[in-house]
Amino acid sequence: MFRIKDHVISLVAVFLALGLGILIGTTLSDEMLITQQRLLIEQMTKEQKGLREERRAMEARLQTVVHDLSLWKKYQEALYPILVSGALTGKRVSVIVHGAEMPPGVLEILRDADAILCNLIRIRERQALNDTASGVGAALAALTANELLTAEMEESLAPFLADERILLEQLDRGKPDAVILVLGELEFTDKRLVNELVAGLPQDRFTVVGLEWSSVRASLFGQLRAAGISTIDNADTVFGQVSLLAVLRGNAGNFGIKSSAEQLMANF
C-alpha cells in the first residue's frame, strides 16, 4: 500500500544523491582545472627559460658577428689604398646609367683609382622614354665615343635632353677607353636602346662592362653576355667594385653572386 512517508523518503534520497553527485563533480572539476593550470604554468616556465637561453645565445652570436665585421672593416680600410690607388691611372671612363640608381661607391672607387671620368649619362626608366626612343641609343653611343653626331642623331636626342629624360653630366669630353653600363630591372630598361648602345660601342675600340645591383632579379645581362660583354651583378658591394677595377684592367668575365656569374670576383 502506498504511503506518503515512503514517498518523502524516496524524494529525499534522490535529492541527496543528486547533491552528492554535484559536490563530487565540482570537486573533481576544480582539481582537474588546478592540475591543468599547473601543467600550463610549468610548460610556460620551460618555454620562457628556453627563450632566455636562446636570446643569450643570439646576443653572444651577435657580439661575435659585430666583432668580425669590425675586423673586416679595418682590413678593408688597410687593403683599399693598396689595391685601388693608381689602379686605373690614365684610364678614361664613361658611365651610362639606365633604369637604375648609381650603385654607391662606384664613382668613388673610380676616382680613387685615378681614372678619368669623361662623362656621366643618366637615362630615365623605359616608361618615360616611350616608343620615340628609336635611334637615341645610337646617338648616345656616338656622344659617349666623342664622335660627331649626325643631324638625325641630334634631332632624335634633342627632346630627351630638353625635358631631362636624359641628363648629360660632361666632365671631360675626351674619347673614353672604357664604358660602364649601369642597368636596372628588365621592366625599367629599354632593350632596343641598350642594343643600340652596345652596337655603337664596338669592343675592339672600347672596354664595355655591365653593372647592376645585387637586388636586380630580371635584367638585360643575358643580352650583354651574349654580346661578349663582361658583367658584374653585385656592383653595390666592395667585391663587385674590386671586380670592376679588374675588368677595366683587362680581366674580362662575368662576376658576382647570381647563378649566371662565372665566379664571385675577378682576379685583380
Image (cartoon, rainbow, N blue to C red):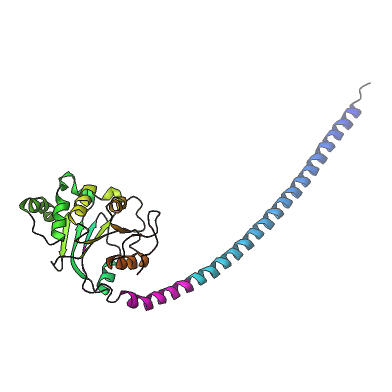
Using residue 10 as the reference point, say whether residue 164 is left or right of it: left
| Vertical order, 35 against 77 (above or below) | above
**Place of residue 35 in the rendered image (x, y in percent of width and height, measured from the top left):** 74, 52
Q: Residue furthest top?
A: 1
The residue at the point 26 percent across, 68 percent down is 107
| Vertical order, 117 against 194 (above or below) | below
Q: Residue furthest left?
A: 151
Q: Is residue 112 visible?
A: yes
Using residue 177 as the reference point, say whether residue 23 is left or right of it: right
**Of 255 and 227, which appears nearest the observer?**
227
The residue at the point 41 percent across, 77 percent down is 74
The residue at the point 78 percent across, 42 percent down is 25
- Count the numbered circles shown: 0
| Quadrant where the N terminus is found in the figure | top right
Q: Is residue 91 found inside the magenta-colored segment of the image?
A: yes
Q: Residue furthest front?
A: 204
| Quadrant where the C terminus is found in the figure | bottom left
**Place of residue 127 in the rendered image (x, y in percent of width and height, measured from the top left):** 22, 47
| Vertical order, 52 against 161 (above or below) | below
Q: Is residue 24 found inside the magenta-colored segment of the image?
A: no
**Place of residue 156 in the rendered image (x, y in percent of width and height, measured from the top left):** 10, 50
Instruction: Determine which quarter of the picture holds residue 238.
Output: bottom left
**Of 222 and 190, which appears nearest the observer?**
222
Using residue 135 as the reference point, say whether residue 254 is left or right of it: right
The residue at the point 5 percent across, 52 percent down is 151
**Of 166 and 91, which appears nearest the observer?**
91
Magenta: main secondary structure equals helix
Q: Is residue 105 visible?
A: no
Q: Which residues are magenta?
A: 66-94
**Of 88 and 158, which appears nearest the observer?**
88
